[in-house]
């Protein structure tokens, strides 16, 4: 074997090893204590530094057992010697803000849920490109996946979430009331279903709720001749774009230019944002009476001929 070929083989082995090491999660040490449940349905408290994770749906461990674990998204992976890691679901997390005071299992409490209402959703198309070079390069594959982006109004904020549950199993309708909690890390939101189960959703962003009709009038003295407030029969859709000044079409009809606040009837609608020199931006959405949806069209330039 020539020295050049030998060098190439060694380089490939080193690169493969580097990729494998990069893919491996960073493991930490922690101590497990049994929280509740019988031998088949135990939940545990995993204590590590200033944090305690309450976990379930994993292996059978002893009280006080020391383990190596890694955190990824809403799961904890516990090393299982000679076999695949145990995958555990995180129910809640407690962290002490005082580094001199580590939390105890007595500090743990069950997840606290808030009530919220699904205002509606839009459809986003996510394009995944695999391979090297540009999207039109040889050997490059691309796939498109539709994501439902829901707006969930809570007590203080409106949350935009998507990819709820495995394979987007969590589906909700406009006006539906749900119980939810927000992860302490701030990038996950969990919607409760079937009493003890949760759909884990990706939290994309938040905004302040829109003022309700009549809120401004309540702060001012009422006029004796004031007319009764109009009954809300439609839904509000705010549409902006980058760049602005694009044409808006709703269900095939021109409705204005971006940015605009528009009123639509409850139900399903097709929205298209158009601008010369840019690809059309399209969304399908479903809205309920009195709801408010905010859309921001990030438009892509058309390819040069």
Image (cartoon, helix red, strand yellow):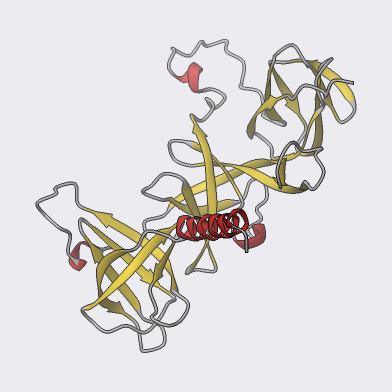
Residue name at image x 57 percent, y 10 percent: 225
Q: Percent x, y for residue 26?
A: 37, 59
Residue name at image x 49 percent, y 68 percent: 195
Figure quadrant of the C terminus: top right
Question: Is 233 drawn above or below residue 70 in the view shown?
Answer: above
Q: Percent x, y for residue 122?
A: 70, 39
Q: Is residue 39 left or right of residue 202?
A: left
- Say which of 64 and 218 sits in front: 64
Question: Is 32 drawn above or below residue 154 in the view shown?
Answer: below
Kindly indicate the quadrant of the structure image that contains residue 12: bottom right
Q: Is residue 189 left or right of residue 238?
A: left
Q: Across the whole image, how many numbered discs are drawn on residues?
A: 0
Q: Percent x, y for residue 245?
A: 74, 11
Residue name at image x 11 percent, y 54 percent: 101
Figure quadrant of the N terminus: bottom right
Kindly indicate the quadrant of the structure image that contains residue 258: top right
């Amino acid at each position: 074997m020539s020295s050049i070929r030998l060098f190439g083989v060694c380089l490939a082995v080193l690169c493969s090893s580097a990729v494998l090491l990069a893919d491996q999660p960073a493991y930490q040490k922690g101590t497990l204590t049994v929280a509740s449940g019988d031998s088949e349905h135990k939940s545990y408290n995993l204590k590590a530094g200033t944090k305690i994770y309450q976990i379930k749906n994993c292996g059978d461990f002893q009280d006080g057992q020391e383990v190596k674990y890694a955190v990824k998204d809403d799961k904890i992976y516990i090393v299982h010697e000679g076999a695949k890691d145990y995958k555990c679901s995180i129910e809640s997390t407690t962290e002490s803000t005082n580094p001199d005071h580590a939390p105890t299992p007595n500090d743990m409490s069950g997840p606290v849920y808030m009530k919220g209402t699904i205002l509606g959703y839009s459809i986003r198309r996510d394009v995944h490109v695999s391979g090297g070079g540009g999207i039109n390069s040889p050997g490059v594959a691309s796939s498109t996946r539709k994501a439902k982006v829901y707006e969930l109004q809570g007590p203080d904020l409106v949350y935009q979430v998507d990819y709820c549950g495995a394979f987007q199993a969590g589906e909700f309708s406009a006006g539906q009331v749900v119980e939810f909690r927000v992860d302490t890390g701030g990038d996950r939101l969990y919607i409760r279903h079937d009493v003890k189960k949760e759909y884990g959703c990706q939290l994309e962003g938040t905004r302040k709720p829109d003022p309700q009709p009549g809120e401004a009038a309540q702060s001012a003295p009422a006029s004796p001749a004031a007319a009764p407030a109009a009954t809300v029969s439609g839904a509000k859709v705010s549409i902006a774009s980058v760049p602005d000044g694009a044409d808006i079409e709703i269900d095939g009809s021109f409705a204005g230019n971006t940015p605009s606040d528009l009123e639509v009837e409850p139900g399903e609608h097709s929205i298209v944002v158009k601008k010369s020199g840019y690809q059309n931006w399209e969304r399908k959405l479903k809205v309920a009476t009195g709801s408010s949806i905010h859309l921001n069209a990030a438009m892509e330039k058309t390819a040069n001929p």
